Image (tube, rainbow, N blue to C red):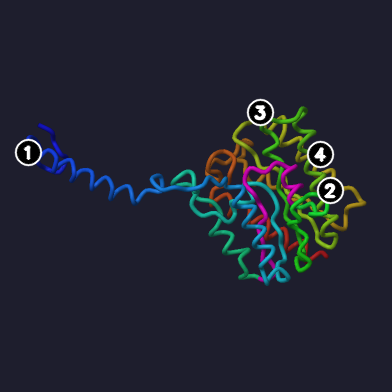
Amino acid sequence: MVYSGRGALCGGAVLAACAALMLSGSIANAASFQSAKSAARVEYWQKREADIANMMATSKTLSAVRLVFLGDSITDFWTLGEDPWVRGQWHGASVWAESFGGRDPANLAINLGVSGDRTEHILHRILPEAQGGLGELDAPALQPDYVILLAGINNSWAPEDPAADSIYEGVVALVEAVHARKPHARIVLQSLLPTNSEDKNRDVVRPVNARLLAFTKDASRAGWIRFLNLYPSFVDASGQQIVSDFNDGLHPSTAGYRTWRDRLVTFLAKDRAER
């Protein structure tokens, strides 16, 4: 005798009928799962790049954009709500809508972050097509007041050696490329955020941040670059990463994006007042 799971015993002459009933339930359930449907594999970053290309080619409001956010997943996830890979983790979409979605025209923003990008990948995206890049900054209508840049932490995995030197040079190359594409925009170069690894913070993150600060203080760049040191806002009194501001030790939670937003909006308002 076989228990059908539907409150009755099946056996003998009714076994086939029970099997058919169970199979029909399985087929009905299969229709509700994506796992049971054919789908071509498209990596997240590929879809993200395609979405950006479409946005830059078809948007009729690029001339109204005042801020361009550029970077990797930490920037990209400003516009994500619930994490598509880890249920129950939330990112910055609600905070983005509050502050960069157009309620304040001075902070209307476009997000060019792509998850997984290293500095060389971002550089490829912003170089003009004539130079073999994707030309993501080349739309003539896109004339932002600020380009908000945060990049480099992905280069600390499978790093070139020394990692801090590689990351610093990669970020500098990005800054120079952005300035060449949008010379009238002011670049807000943001520090790397603290990770949940004190070894990495000590050996890579803080040394890179110190060098980037010095880079922005060069008098020849004074008119077009500013440094926003976010690091202190994401550590506690003992210097450890504030756990609640991150989902996984690297990517900010909604609370983390709110902290970032508060620092950035205040920073921009002060900088505009001083221009």
Graded by Cα atoms within 10 Å as few (under 14), some (14 to 19) or many (20 or more), the crowding at tag 1 reads: few
Residue at the disc numbered 1: 13
Q: Residue at x 64, y 49 (%)?
A: 114
Label 2 sits on a secondary structure element that is helix
Label 1 sits on a secondary structure element that is helix
Residue at the disc numbered 2: 216
123 lies above or below 102: above
Residue at the disc numbered 3: 199
Which segment did they paint magenta? 105-125
202 lies above or below 212: above
Q: CA distance from mark 3 to mark 1?
A: 69 Å
The kind of residue on which mark 1 rests is: Ala
Which comes sooner in the sequence, label 2 or label 4?
A: 4
The kind of residue on which mark 3 rests is: Asp
Whether 111 is among the magenta residues is yes
Q: Residue at x 88, y 52 (%)?
A: 221
Which comes sooner in the sequence, label 3 or label 1?
A: 1
Label 4 sits on a secondary structure element that is helix
**Residue 96 at x, y = what percent?**
59, 60
Residue at the disc numbered 4: 169
Q: CA distance from mark 2 to mark 3?
A: 26 Å
Graded by Cα atoms within 10 Å as few (under 14), some (14 to 19) or many (20 or more), the crowding at tag 4 reads: some
126 lies above or below 193: below
Graded by Cα atoms within 10 Å as few (under 14), some (14 to 19) or many (20 or more), the crowding at tag 2 reads: many
Which of discs 3 and 4 lies nearer the camera? The answer is 4
The kind of residue on which mark 2 rests is: Thr
User: Mark 3 near mark 1, Cβ–Cβ under 8 Å?
Assistant: no
